[in-house]
Amino acid sequence: MTRALHALSLALGDLASRRVLRVLAQSLALTLLLFLIAGGALVFAGRWALDHWDWLDGPGLDLASALLVVVLIAGSWLLFRAVAIAVVGLFADAIVADVEARHYPAAAARAINVGWRASIVLALASLGRLILGNLVALPFYILLLVTGIGTLLLALAVNALLLGRDLEAMVLARHPDRPHLGRAARWSLGLLSAAAFLIPVANFLAPIVGAAMAVHMLHLGRDQP
């Protein structure tokens, strides 16, 4: 965890880079656009379903409406994170290249170029894993609601595993010859990134900071300037 915290402090410093800030603005604008489109589609589909279920009335309709609100809130929480990570996956090569060039020039010189096609494949794979993993865990999220904090802790654990793997993959795409992070390091990377998504305002920066963290986690101690 000490290594991860060191990487986090370096990643926060990388936010001062003009190139990183430009990628942050582009990715955030695209993320919010896609999120609003997807959220609007969910709201429209929910309202359409309630309007056309004639067999629901009175208490049944009230219960369905309340359930729809809960689903939309939970879906928005998952959807924003999934869309944000997928979008950052599209810009990951630019982020990783900038961080490596400034901190690890030897690694940057050995890196291979990741094209748009590979970036799209990585982004879609990340999106699919994040959604599928949380859907599999959804019944357990619901069961743990009675504990008050159990759902949050399980979601943090599930997303830490998923994000750690996806963020590592963004960097390894440029360095396929590099060994993978150890389980503890990958877990620490994913845990700090997943926790950042729970903090208002910080959740907008979480994908970019997570990608920069992954660069530092992979190169710290190996390619020091």
Image: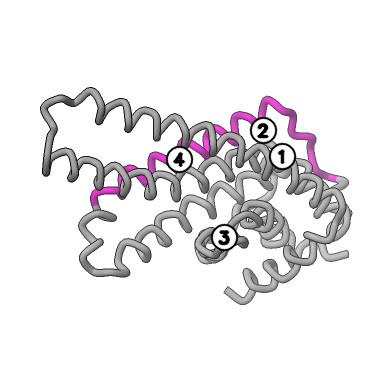
The boundaries of the magenta stretch are 110-139
Residue type highlighted by circle 4: Arg
The residue that disc 3 covers is 193
Element assignment for label 2: helix
Q: Residue at x 18, y 26 (%)?
A: 53
Q: Which of the marked residues, 2 or 3, is nearer the chain's N terminus?
A: 2
- Looking at the image, the residue that sits furthest to the front is 58
Q: How far from the left and from the top, in percent, is residue 23?
A: 77, 45
Quarter of the image containing the C terminus?
bottom right
Circle on res. 129: 4
Q: How far from the left and from the top, in percent, is residue 108?
A: 84, 48
Q: Are marks 3 and 1 in contact (CB under 8 Å)?
A: no
Q: Which of the marked residues, 3 or 1, is nearer the chain's N terminus?
A: 1
User: What separation in Å lies between label 4 and label 3 (alpha carbons)?
Assistant: 16 Å
Residue type highlighted by circle 1: Phe
- Residue 17, quarter of picture: bottom right
Quarter of the image containing the N terminus?
bottom right
Number of disc labels: 4
Q: Are marks 1 and 2 in contact (CB under 8 Å)?
A: yes
Q: How far from the left and from the top, in percent, is residue 180?
A: 60, 53
The residue that disc 2 covers is 119
| Residue 117 falls left or right of residue 132 | right
Circle on res. 191: none
Q: Residue at x 64, y 73 (%)?
A: 5
Q: Which of the marked residues, 1 or 4, is nearer the chain's N terminus?
A: 1
Q: Residue at x 69, y 73 (%)?
A: 6
Which residue is nearer to you in this view: 67 or 9?
A: 67
**Magenta stretch holds residue 115:** yes
